[in-house]
């Protein structure tokens, strides 16, 4: 009797499995039948999408206390670059020479955070989708030159002088290529203190801050033909 | 000529209403906090009687929950 | 002695404020005060005065800083409930255009082909005598005035009084015809009362924002930022329904793309889904709605002297339901390219009784050959679900110009309008005549030319004198390739009042130098029915004069002095007080001037000292009188109308010869025709010239790279401009987009002057174009 009960239970389960499987197979077919070729898909605009990327952390940035002991300055920020706009070099020993950035560098540089070992906050990358980090970012293994060079760093923009009127929002003094995501460098504890934004909760940055560094269009002063 | 400053707490969700109401009063200067339900109120009146009238006006505001005075000054009358 | 005393008091006040701020900071760590931003400012004696922003229809409150008689800075007004202290890049830099070197400072009169600087009194004499002479020779309807949604309320009011009350012609229209006429006819046909029922506070309550063809991140950035804040704080959803992928799409939760013109079908499909799934708010519809249908196949107004009058006909719910059967999501997917899934997705949000939904739209729906219909269709969705006139629930039509509502719509600077009502209504004519103190017979009962037809009449030689104020039609009209030669003809005497030289002033016979925004006092009315006042802050250069005063001076010279008894110093106040009489009552009462001076604006109907934030809702609107929760008192039966409006194709669709759609619009940096914003260095540097946006796939096929020169050709003309691929926006495949601010690349030479037959608003978003690599 007991055995019969168990067998019937299994039979019941089996039948249930068959029906459910059938049903899900049928609905699966139905979904697949919906013709999708008419639909226009939404493309991504890299230069526009980036601005909003870290906006989900905006309110966290607002509430973060300032850790004055471990702030970066604009000077050290530029020191780490060969010239204004160059990819920064890696100022610390890397964890694993043979690995893609996705599973090493991004552990600290995707979201930042305090690193005891270096006694500093890890800067957040503005382009976490590019994971071959060391294509552009290299370590500094020596302080000496191969031969002397007369290369001079181009003048990097300083903070606090880019507003057109007293109190008006400053313009963006640098190209935003690869740096579309404003919050990654301008908010959080790793942001250089001179350029840390006072209002990270305002997400639509380029509502008020427009680029001032359009390199490609060299325009003469606009003049009218008439008059 | 009393000059006083207060912390004004609005009732829940009535911050804008309170800002509007206070800025309509001549002797008041308001500075709302951007991220908290609180505003700073500075009052400036010509005489003590005017001060009394203003006080009554402030107490009549429905959107005001609590008014806490922080500092008060009295400049000497000089004409 | 006095100064030292006030200084001392100022110092004490500052001390008092600082101690309060310190106290606040100990109680609430991290507290922020708007005024704290001033801390780093060079101290000096900057004097801050409130005003509404000069640019768009959002109507942000700004504080303009002046020092030694010059405007030196701008900041957001923290007391304004519109923008709460935030502005956009145009707002922050607006005063910088004042220092442009080519400012029009004196009147210029064309003599033998060159402009001669002329004393303004002489120039006004000439304008008045020309106008008088034209009327004597050719009749009243040979003179016309074309004003603006940027005119202040007093400017619009005196223009209307001058043309309709004094001269007695309806030849007055304005550029607002080009931007929100469809919104007006939409409101009038659905509700019988113009302007939105809700207000910006809806943003703080809504769960879902549906943006209909509206790139708010660039065009209404301050409101968009308020939406983003709600998205982050409360998880509100933003749905971007458009024909172009933009900055808005990037920030939205969902971006849905459709083929141009097919929004009509999608809106009907949403209504179909709402009814099919039983999401109709039956008690609301039964109590407060009726059903109508109108004429179809109306045409597109492409021919001169085109006339159309709709014939509304009552239908019942059953007939409406039957009509919607042509708009099942499956059928509409084929027309629109929007998947069945996405149509159902949108319908589900509207249908969910627990979700509050606000619809926003602007030029995408209004500049549409079926613009009135499209407005009706959005209202249908909100009426069927009863999501209207409540905090966080409602359709909200945005405007582009700072006083499109306040001046163009409320004062009524259209050919068919009066400050209250329309010229075709005898009662309205009698009221206007009474307040203006003119014989009632003088106001003609028949409307004459709407904007497009007005410039066609100039071209035909019927209008022999035209005066434009605060607008730049030869950049902003559609098909300027016809209207520029039209205005250049000797048959018409052209007077242009402006602040800067423009392509329109280039064809003028007389150029009058106008005062800019803060060089005069005035009032603007924004999209949420908020009227805002500002005082003159700085002196204008040379002989610049406020537009209202120039109109009054010409009227006086023509012998109408007794109708314009205003004083030069105080005319703004006097005119506003006269104008207020038109709107007395609790349906449209305007706030008294003292109130407007003391605070950043008030929303009409202003009744018993209170703004009415939600109209037609008995809880908020004292004009509701039917003892129900809602009362649509604009209509005689108190019911809002759900309209049966079908999908009809656009007048000029792409074909083999012209395979692309041409869409035009704006960018965040520039405002309209750019005559002001291009003179602001910050904005010009950020966006120096126009461009044509292509879909990357189209660009690849045509071997066009970003920055390459591209030739656009339509049946009206051609133009060469740089290509933009993967930059600010991406249009749908087989569509191109061009911003219209650039007077060196006049895209409107190419656009089509078709318009909505009901509203007469042109469609700048759709015509056929060929794209060639140069």
Image (spheres, rainbow, N blue to C red):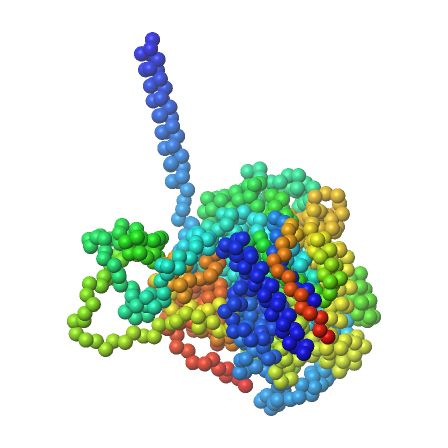
Please say if C271 is above or below C221.
above
Q: Quadrant of the C terminus of chain B?
A: bottom right
Give the mark count: 0
On screen, residue A115 versus residue C396, left or right, reads left
Residue that appears at 38% across and 63% down: A192
Residue closest to the eye, C100 or A98: A98
Q: Position of residue C510 (x, y in %)?
A: 63, 83
Q: Quadrant of the N terminus of chain B?
A: bottom right
Residue that appears at 65% across and 77% down: C3
* Residue farthest toward the left in the current orientation of the protein: A146
Residue that appears at 69% across and 79% down: C550
* Residue farthest toward the top in the current orientation of the protein: A1
On screen, residue C228 versus residue C520, left or right, reads left
On screen, residue C240 versus residue C468, left or right, reads left
Q: Position of residue A199 (x, y in %)?
A: 48, 60
Q: Quadrant of residue A87?
A: bottom left
Residue C641 seen from this side? yes
Residue that appears at 73% across and 65% down: B47
On screen, residue B55 versus residue A19, left or right, reads right
Residue closest to the eye, C688 or C487: C688
Q: Position of residue C238 (x, y in %)?
A: 50, 51
Q: Position of residue C75 (x, y in %)?
A: 55, 67
Residue C690 seen from this side? no
Q: Quadrant of residue A46?
A: bottom left
């Amino acid at each position: 009797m007991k055995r019969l009960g168990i067998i019937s239970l299994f039979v019941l389960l089996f039948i249930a499995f068959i029906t459910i499987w059938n049903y899900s197979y049928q609905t699966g077919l139905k979904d697949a039948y919906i013709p999708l070729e008419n639909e226009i898909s939404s493309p991504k605009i890299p230069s526009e999408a980036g601005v909003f990327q870290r906006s989900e952390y905006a309110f966290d940035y607002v509430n973060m206390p300032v850790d004055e002991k471990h702030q970066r300055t604009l000077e050290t920020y530029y020191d780490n670059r060969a010239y204004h706009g160059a990819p920064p070099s890696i100022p610390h020993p890397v964890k694993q020479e043979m690995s893609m950035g996705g599973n090493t560098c991004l552990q600290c540089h995707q979201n930042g955070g305090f690193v005891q070992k270096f006694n500093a906050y890890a800067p957040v990358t503005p382009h976490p989708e590019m994971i071959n980090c060391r294509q552009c970012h290299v370590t500094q293994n020596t302080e000496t030159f191969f031969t002397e060079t007369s290369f001079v760093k181009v003048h990097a923009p300083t903070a606090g002088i880019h507003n057109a009127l007293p109190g008006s929002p400053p313009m963006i003094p640098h190209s935003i290529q690869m740096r579309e995501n404003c919050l990654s460098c301008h908010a959080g504890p790793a942001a250089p203190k001179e350029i840390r934004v006072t209002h990270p909760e305002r997400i639509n940055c380029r509502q008020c801050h427009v680029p001032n560094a359009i390199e490609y269009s060299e325009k003469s002063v606009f003049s009218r033909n008439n008059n | 000529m009393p000059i006083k400053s207060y912390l004004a707490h609005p009732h829940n969700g009535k911050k804008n209403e309170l800002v509007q109401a206070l800025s309509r009063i001549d002797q008041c200067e308001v500075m709302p906090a951007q991220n908290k339900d609180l505003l700073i109120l500075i009052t400036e009146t010509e005489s003590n009687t005017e001060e009394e009238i203003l006080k009554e006006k402030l107490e009549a505001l429905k959107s005001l929950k609590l008014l806490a005075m922080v500092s008060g000054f009295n400049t000497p009358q000089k004409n | 002695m006095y100064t030292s005393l006030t200084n001392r008091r100022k110092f004490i006040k500052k001390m008092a404020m600082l101690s309060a701020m310190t106290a606040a900071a100990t109680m609430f760590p991290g507290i922020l005060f708007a005024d704290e931003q001033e801390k780093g400012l060079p101290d000096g004696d900057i004097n801050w005065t409130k005003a509404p922003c000069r640019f768009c229809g959002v109507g942000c409150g700004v504080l303009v800083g002046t020092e030694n008689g010059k405007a030196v800075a701008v900041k957001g007004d923290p007391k304004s409930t519109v923008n709460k202290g935030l502005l956009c890049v145009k707002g922050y830099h607006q005063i910088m255009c004042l220092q442009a070197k080519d400012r029009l400072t004196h009147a210029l009169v064309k003599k033998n082909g060159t402009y001669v600087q002329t004393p303004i009194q002489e120039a006004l004499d000439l304008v008045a005598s020309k106008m008088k002479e034209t009327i004597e020779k050719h009749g009243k309807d040979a003179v016309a005035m074309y004003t603006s949604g940027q005119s202040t309320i007093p400017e619009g009011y005196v223009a209307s009084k001058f043309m309709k009350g004094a001269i007695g012609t309806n030849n007055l229209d304005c550029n607002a015809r080009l931007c929100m006429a469809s919104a007006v006819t939409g409101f009038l046909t659905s509700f019988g009362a113009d302007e939105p029922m809700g207000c910006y506070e809806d943003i703080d309550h809504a769960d879902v924002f549906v943006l209909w063809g509206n790139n708010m991140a660039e065009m209404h950035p301050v409101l968009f930022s308020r939406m983003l804040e709600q998205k982050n704080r409360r998880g509100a959803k933003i749905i971007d329904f458009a024909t172009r992928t933009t900055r808005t799409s990037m920030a939205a939760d969902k971006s849905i793309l459709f083929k141009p013109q097919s929004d009509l079908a999608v809106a009907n499909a949403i209504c179909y889904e709402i009814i099919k799934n039983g999401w109709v708010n039956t008690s609301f519809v039964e109590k407060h709605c009726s059903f109508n249908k109108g004429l179809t196949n109306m045409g597109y107004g492409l021919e001169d002297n085109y006339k159309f009058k709709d014939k509304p006909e009552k239908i019942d719910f059953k007939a409406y339901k039957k009509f919607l059967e042509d708009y099942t999501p499956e059928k509409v997917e084929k027309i629109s390219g929007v998947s069945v899934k996405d149509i159902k997705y949108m319908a589900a949000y509207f249908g969910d009784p627990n979700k509050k939904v606000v619809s926003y739209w602007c030029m995408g729906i209004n500049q549409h050959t079926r613009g009135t219909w499209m407005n009706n269709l959005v209202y249908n969705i909100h009426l069927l679900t009863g999501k209207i006139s409540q905090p966080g629930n409602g359709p909200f039509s945005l405007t582009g110009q700072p006083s499109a509502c306040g001046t163009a719509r409320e004062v009524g600077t259209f050919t068919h309008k009066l400050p209250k009502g329309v010229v075709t209504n005898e009662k309205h004519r009698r009221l206007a005549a009474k307040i203006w103190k003119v014989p009632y017979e003088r106001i003609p009962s028949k409307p004459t030319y709407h904007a497009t037809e007005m410039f066609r009449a100039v071209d035909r030689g019927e209008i022999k004198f035209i005066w434009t104020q605060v607008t730049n039609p030869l950049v902003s009209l559609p098909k300027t390739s016809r209207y520029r030669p039209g205005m250049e003809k000797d048959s018409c005497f052209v007077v242009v009042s402006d602040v800067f030289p423009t392509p329109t002033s280039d064809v003028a016979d007389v150029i009058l130098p106008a005062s800019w925004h803060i060089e005069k006092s005035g009032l603007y009315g924004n999209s949420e029915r908020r009227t805002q006042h500002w005082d003159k802050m700085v002196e204008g250069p040379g002989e610049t004069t406020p537009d209202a005063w120039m109109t009054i001076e010409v009227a006086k010279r023509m012998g109408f002095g007794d109708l314009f008894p205003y004083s030069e110093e105080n005319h703004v106040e006097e005119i506003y007080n006269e104008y207020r009489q038109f709107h007395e009552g609790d349906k449209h009462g305007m706030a008294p001037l003292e109130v407007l001076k003391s605070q950043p604006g008030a929303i009409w109907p202003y009744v018993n000292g209170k703004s009415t934030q939600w109209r037609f809702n008995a809880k908020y609107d004292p004009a509701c009188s039917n003892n129900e929760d809602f009362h649509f008192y604009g209509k005689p039966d108190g019911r809002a109308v759900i309209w049966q409006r079908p999908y009809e194709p656009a007048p000029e669709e792409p074909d083999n010869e012209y395979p692309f759609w041409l869409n035009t619009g704006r960018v965040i940096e520039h405002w309209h025709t750019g005559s002001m914003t291009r003179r602001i260095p910050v904005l010009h540097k950020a966006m120096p010239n126009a461009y044509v946006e292509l879909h990357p796939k189209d660009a690849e096929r045509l071997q066009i790279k970003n920055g390459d020169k591209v030739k656009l050709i339509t049946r009206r003309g051609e133009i060469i401009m740089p290509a933009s691929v993967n930059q600010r926006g991406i249009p749908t495949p087989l569509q191109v987009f061009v911003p219209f601010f650039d007077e060196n690349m006049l895209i409107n030479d190419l656009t089509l002057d078709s318009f909505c037959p009901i509203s007469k608003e042109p469609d700048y978003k759709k015509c056929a174009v060929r794209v060639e690599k140069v």
